[in-house]
Image (cartoon, grey):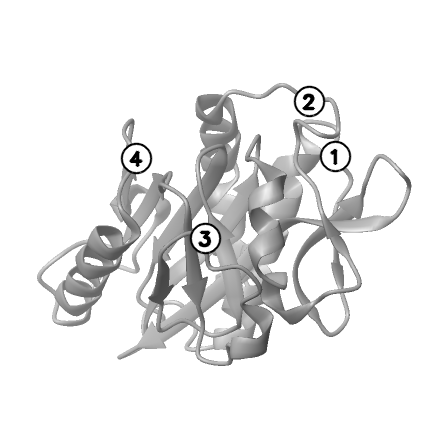
């Protein structure tokens, strides 16, 4: 059997918002189909209506103001927010064919988003002990611009990343995002960058091959 490549992965981009529960059900079904060889791997780019999602480590004390629906996501991590103006990427890859290394997958996923944001002049980085994508806010303080949350079932990945392009940042105040209360949340819009989601998608796809190479240790 030939090794899977970037060309074999399906890309799906939604133009309308998808309710989180519907996306979660679809992702779970696709995970099962990939694991049993009945479907191709997939990257799914979309936007959700406002929702708070709870990871497996979520602490109820960090749900400060549940003004939106709260959904158990089944991914790792704590509470996060999804909503309009945020690009969400669900990455469903078969790690049986791509190294069987969950830590490498997370690291490579972070690197993919960081490299994509750099294309738009945003310097981002990983921070030790804090999962996610970090940058300097307009006040010079470190702030989170992207979240990472994954689950692996039968060696097929689920969930992925979210990047704040132009969301209502006040919506994050209903939770302690990812359990980190001493840091703020920012967006490309807040940093003075007006970016269409399609432009972000294009830049992301252009670096997909590099992401797979890092994941598979072939860089």
Q: Position of residue 74 (x, y in %)?
A: 35, 73
Q: Is 103 situated above or below 178? A: below
Residue that appears at 68% across and 27% down: 120
Pick out the residue farthest to the left: 38
Indicate the quadrant containing the C terminus: top left, top right, bottom left or bottom right: bottom right
In-front residue for pair 116/63:
63
Q: Is residue 38 left or right of residue 17?
A: left
Cα–Cα gap, marks 2 and 4: 22 Å
Considering the numbered disc 2 on the image, is that residue within a helix, a strand or a loop? loop
Q: Earlier in the sequence, mark 3 or mark 1?
A: 3
- Is mark 2 in CB contact (under 8 Å) with mark 1? yes
Q: Earlier in the sequence, mark 4 or mark 3?
A: 4
Q: Earlier in the sequence, mark 2 or mark 1?
A: 1
Q: Is residue 69 left or right of residue 29?
A: right
Q: Could one spot residue 143 in this view of the protein?
A: yes
Query: Which numbered marker is on residue 67?
Result: 3
Cα–Cα gap, marks 2 and 1: 9 Å
In-front residue for pair 176/201:
176
Q: Position of residue 104 (x, y in %)?
A: 55, 70
Query: Which numbered marker is on residue 193?
Result: 2
Residue that appears at 60% across and 66% down: 178
Residue that appears at 19% across and 60% down: 25
Density class for disc 1 (Cα within 10 Å; few <14, some 14-19, many ≥20) is some
Quickly name the residue at label 1.
122
Cα–Cα gap, marks 3 and 1: 31 Å
């Amino acid at each position: 059997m030939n090794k899977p490549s970037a060309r074999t992965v399906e890309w799906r981009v939604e133009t309308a918002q998808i309710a989180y529960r519907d996306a979660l059900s679809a992702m779970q079904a696709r995970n099962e189909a990939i694991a049993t060889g009945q479907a191709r791997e997939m990257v799914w780019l979309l936007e959700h209506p406002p929702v708070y999602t709870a990871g497996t480590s979520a602490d109820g004390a960090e749900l400060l103001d549940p003004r939106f629906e709260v959904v158990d996501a089944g991914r790792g991590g704590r509470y996060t927010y999804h909503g309009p103006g945020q690009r969400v990427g669900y990455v469903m890859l078969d790690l049986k064919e791509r190294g069987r290394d969950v830590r490498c997958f997370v690291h490579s996923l972070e690197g993919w988003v960081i490299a994509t944001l750099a294309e738009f002049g945003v310097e981002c980085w990983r921070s030790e002990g804090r999962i996610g994508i970090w940058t300097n806010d307009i006040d010079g303080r470190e702030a989170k611009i992207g979240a990472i949350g994954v689950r692996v079932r039968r060696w097929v990945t689920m969930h992925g990343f979210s990047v704040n392009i132009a969301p209502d940042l006040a919506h994050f105040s209903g939770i302690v995002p990812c359990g980190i209360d001493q840091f703020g949340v920012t967006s490309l819009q807040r940093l003075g960058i007006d970016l269409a989601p399609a432009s972000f998608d294009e830049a992301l796809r252009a670096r997909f091959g590099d992401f797979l190479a890092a994941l598979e240790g072939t860089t």
